[in-house]
Image (tube, rainbow, N blue to C red):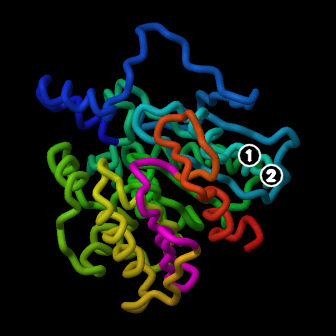
Amino acid sequence: MLESLLAHLPGPLRRALDTVGLTPAPTPPGAPPPDAPGGVRVEEVAAFGANPGGLTMKLHAPESLPRAGAPLLVLLHGCGQDAVRFAVAAGWTALADRLGAPLLLPEQASRNNPGRCFNWFEPGDIARDGGEVRSILQMTEAAIDRFGCDRRRVFVAGLSAGGAMAAAVMAAYPDAFAAGAVVAGLPVGCATDVGSAMTRMRAAGADLSGPDWAARSRAVAPSGYAGRWPRISIWQGGADRVVDPANAVNLEAQWVALHGLGSAPTQDLSPRPGLRRRVWRDAVELWTIDGMAHGYPVALASAEPFVLSSGIDATGAIARFWGLLPA
């Protein structure tokens, strides 16, 4: 997420941030994309709809063809990440194989965003039936039709800019997703352009009530929508210096209000020192990991950028919260 916004900064400031590792390494012109590790099979699908957001559709299907009625998983990468490599490193391809479910991997293009970040802050890209959220929905529909997936079991997750976009696509299409997960992301409607996105990443600000935050989600939803809202799992590192951790609290307040829940969580747990899980019935959960920087938590070390060894398998925990794995 940060990488796209850095493209708009003056050269000296950008170079200063380069020295602390906050900008992605450039890809040599004409260089081929890196091979997916572990022999993971991924297909690029060219025809899936009008694609107003100009995104690329990639699909990973398990070795055995998904049975009719299988769930569909959708994963949105962070800035500068290769969608497939991120999916492998974060355990999503393994989860898809275990569940016998297809995994949809929308991928951003540099022509849309110089840092290849999803444009989570652009009103035209998050409003229902427009821009990038529409492209993601068209890919989702194409995958459902192709594999005969259960429309009641479609799930979306994302990291950083992908996390903010996962929240946005659930807000725009609450009738299309059963649940989602946002890792190191931001609430829907907290920014409307590059400048405000930079501000909100640095300091969450906007001390709104839960209902006020919910109104920002409703603004991109179907007019007068009165149906159910997707369940949401939120993850945040306490030492994140890219996205202010207070954004996770605002996101929690937004979705608690959307679900019409009370003012206090039903559970407030500390599974181990430095790890906190706050649960609002079975609809909203917030995991906070003390000392974790900006990234996606995994149990074991990974060389993939922004996939961080934190002693917890976030993907497995998310799948359990969604009801896809035993509790």
Magenta span contains residue 279: yes
- Name the residue: 18% across, 65% down: 205
Magenta span contains residue 287: yes
- Name the residue: 18% across, 31% down: 8
The region drawn magenta spans 272-296
Q: Is residue 159 above or below residue 269?
A: above
Q: Is residue 54 above or below residue 152?
A: above
Amino acid under disc 1: Ala
Quadrant of the image occupied by residue 37: top right
Residue 161: x and y in percent read 38, 46
Q: Is residue 122 above or below residue 177?
A: above
Between 249 and 71, the one nearer to me in the picture: 249
Alpha-carbon neighbours of circle 1 within 10 Å: few (<14), some, or many (≥20)? some
The residue wearing badge 1 is 94
Residue 57 visible in the current orientation: no
Amino acid under disc 2: Arg
- Name the residue: 33% across, 32% down: 21
Residue 33: x and y in percent read 55, 18
Q: Are marks 2 and 1 in contact (CB under 8 Å)?
A: yes
Question: Is residue 268 found left or right of 48 in the rendered image?
Answer: left
Secondary element at image label 1: helix
What numbered label is drawn on residue 98?
2
